[in-house]
Image (cartoon, rainbow, N blue to C red):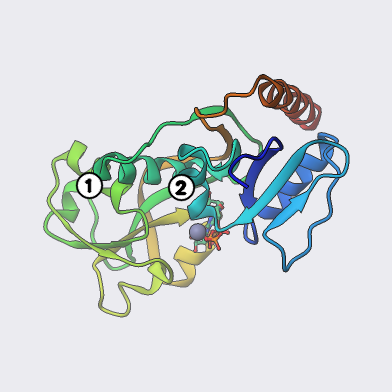
Amino acid sequence: MSQSKRLRIAIQKSGRLSKESQQLLKSCGVKFNVNEQRLIAHADNMPIDLLRVRDDDIPGLVMDGVVDLGIIGENVLEEEQIERQLAGKPAECTKLRELDFGSCRLSLAVPNEFEYKDANSLEGLRIATSYPNLLRRFMQEKGINYSDCMLKGSVEVAPRAGLSDGICDLVSTGATLEANGLYETEVIYRSMACIIQSNKTQSTEKQALINKILSRINGVIRARE
Ligand code: PRT
Ligand code: ZN
């Protein structure tokens, strides 16, 4: 498996990026059928294998050279990059381009009754998040001391449950914040889906195929603009 001559592309198995990732590759002429039970989908008409995994695993798979390409939210990529730099693990990969889906922002939000002036209002408070590295980077730049509460899900209910004073979470329409009696105070990171390449891809055949796919992606996105 690790000697594969076929180009490997990691995409999200199920979630907000999975349909559009598959659709984009299909629009580029890659023919494949996904079996929900299977990790791998083989393309019929090109030497390409799709690996369907949790989005959080995609940056690491690319950075370690296990796959050649990955489609991932910039938020997850950047968070993982900081995490791996801190752990002394390989954290390099090449962002080939931003894609035209997966738009969201990572924002700080506080309960409606909280009187927020600026980021300094958060001094000494506890913030719940799934993105501790991006949060730390922002707070360090602002020179604000805080504690964090790491939650992989249900971040938006943390203040009401008494777990934190505020949150740092992804927002797209803002409906989730509103439904939980929270309001957005600072955008700390803006994100889109992007396609990344491993710096460990060596074969010239694979590189030629990557160039072909990238040029088709450029065409597909231009046509959708
Ligand atoms: O199972 P797996 O680990 O693969 O998936 P996941 O649950 O970690 O991720 P998923 O599918 O929820 O999101 C994948 C990626 O989609 C994210 O990393 C972002 O890059 C992108 N994305 C775009 C979003 C949103 N928009 C989004 N709105 N990811 C999550 N949300 C959530 C947010 O966390 C909050 O709960 O939607 C809610 C807010 O939405 P609004 O519209 O109410 O503001
Ligand atoms: Zn995830």
Which image quarter is the C terminus in? top right
Q: Which residue is at the front of the view, 209 or 28? A: 209
Residue 169 vs 100, above or below: the answer is: below
Image location of residue 13, percent across then percent down: 64, 58
**Residue 119 badge:** 1
Indicate left or right for 49 with 102 as reference.
Answer: right
Residue under the point 78% across and 49% down = 42
Residue 132 vs 218, above or below: the answer is: below
- Asked if the residues shown at circle 2 and circle 1 are in contact, with their CB atoms under 8 angstroms apart, the answer is no
Residue under the point 15% across and 56% down = 146
Image location of residue 65, percent across then percent down: 51, 37
For badge 1, the amino acid type reads Ala
Indicate left or right for 158 with 99 as reference.
Answer: left
Q: Secondary structure at mark 1?
A: helix
N-term-proximal mark, 2 vs 1: 2
Q: Which residue is at the front of the view, 12 or 39? A: 39
Q: Which residue is at the front of the view, 204 or 14? A: 204
Image location of residue 181, percent across then percent down: 40, 70
Residue 68 vs 53, above or below: the answer is: above
**Total labels drawn:** 2
For badge 2, the amino acid type reads Val
Image location of residue 127, percent across then percent down: 25, 61
Residue under the point 51% across and 45% down = 61
